[in-house]
Image (spheres, rainbow, N blue to C red):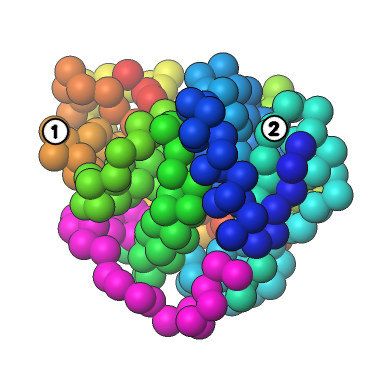
Amino acid sequence: MYLFKQKDDLERHLSTARKEGKRIGFVPTMGALHRGHLSLILAAKEHSDLVVCSIFVNPTQFNDPADFEKYPITIDQDILQLTSAGTDVLFLPSVQEMYPKGLAPEMHYDFGQLETVLEGAHRPGHFQGVGQVVHKLLNLVQPDKLFMGQKDFQQCLIINRLIKLLHLNVELVICPTLREQDGLAMSSRNLRLNATERQNALHISRALYYIKDHLTQAPLKTIADKAINELKGNGFDVDYLDMVSIAPDGNIDFPNTPGKDPLYAVVAAREISSNVRLIDNMQVN
Ligand code: AMP
């Protein structure tokens, strides 16, 4: 596996590969890799000739400085895992390399409604930061396909919109959420939970399975409220737990009853004793 820390070196390497007709698959990450990340690498390997992974803990997408400070870093293990998964190139830039002009936004992305609901409402500025870094990374890597996880439901919609806004020639491939055996969605932030908190975190995926099992024609709000109360009673601050579907224009709809469209339960909640904020989602119909 090649490891590049400088944009120029990465661009030179990829331009040669492109001239050789290689199709590039790209998996952007913030490191502290787990099997969920590796499933994206494997999907990228299957659908491309050359797989590029980036590890960059992007400061501009953290609306909470403490969350940025505490973000887990396990770079040596990450490199071992990426090598054994058959990754061709790892891009590991510094903040200076990605933001040579400083962290102030260079442009504003008009994500419309997507930025005003769910994560957008609860993490002001987060998606602008995501937009900035993904825009920079896509310009550098110029992949044929971009692989992202369904775990970050709204992020997938945002990136879809970013690709359209910028008229980028890249296909977004969304990969399923990998879970631990007990149902907990794999996440780098799980590393910040001790054994008791890790056990408590299970209430999040349980809430989603509960909704899936109890989906009736009753107003969706009734089921959601039950799940919210269950989380609140078990040591969580719930930012949101909603039932949503994806509108034809890529916005997020909040239907009152199940319809024909895929319906997703989406949740963000802070496990109070650890102060770790976890997100998850599941198709429930
Ligand atoms: P992150 O390092 O958290 O920014 O995630 C990098 C990519 O991995 C994103 O596209 C995530 O959606 C994806 N990802 C994170 N957790 C999982 C998971 N449990 N299963 C599948 N993909 C995931």
Tally of numbered discs: 2
Q: Residue at x 61, y 75 (%)?
A: 96
Drawn side of residue 231 relative to residue 260, left or right: right
Q: Position of residue 161 (x, y in %)?
A: 26, 47
Front residue of 2/112: it is 2
Task: Tell me if residue 134 is in the magenta stretch.
Answer: no
Quarter that holds the N terminus = top right
Disc 2 residue crowd, few under 14, some 14–19, many 20+, Cα 10 Å:
many
Q: CA distance from mark 1 to mark 2?
A: 35 Å
Disc 1 residue crowd, few under 14, some 14–19, many 20+, Cα 10 Å:
few
Q: Position of residue 147 (x, y in %)?
A: 48, 34
Q: Amino acid at mark 2?
A: Thr
Q: Earlier in the sequence, mark 1 or mark 2?
A: 2
Q: Residue at x 27, y 23 (%)?
A: 262
Q: Which mark is residue 183?
A: none
Quadrant of the rendered structure where residue 283 is? top left
Q: Residue at x 52, y 73 (%)?
A: 99
Secondary element under disc 1, as helix, strand or loop, is loop
Drawn side of residue 160 relative to residue 191, left or right: left
Q: Is mark 1 within 8 Å of ligand 1?
A: no
Q: Position of residue 259 (x, y in %)?
A: 17, 22
Relative vertical location of residue 99 with respect to residue 91 in this rendering, above or below: below
Reading the image, the residue beneath label 1 is: 248
Reading the image, the residue beneath label 2 is: 87
Relative vertical location of residue 186 with respect to residue 213 in this rendering, above or below: below
Quarter that holds the C terminus = top left
Label the magenta part by its dominant secondary structure.
loop
Relative vertical location of residue 175 with respect to residue 105 in this rendering, above or below: above
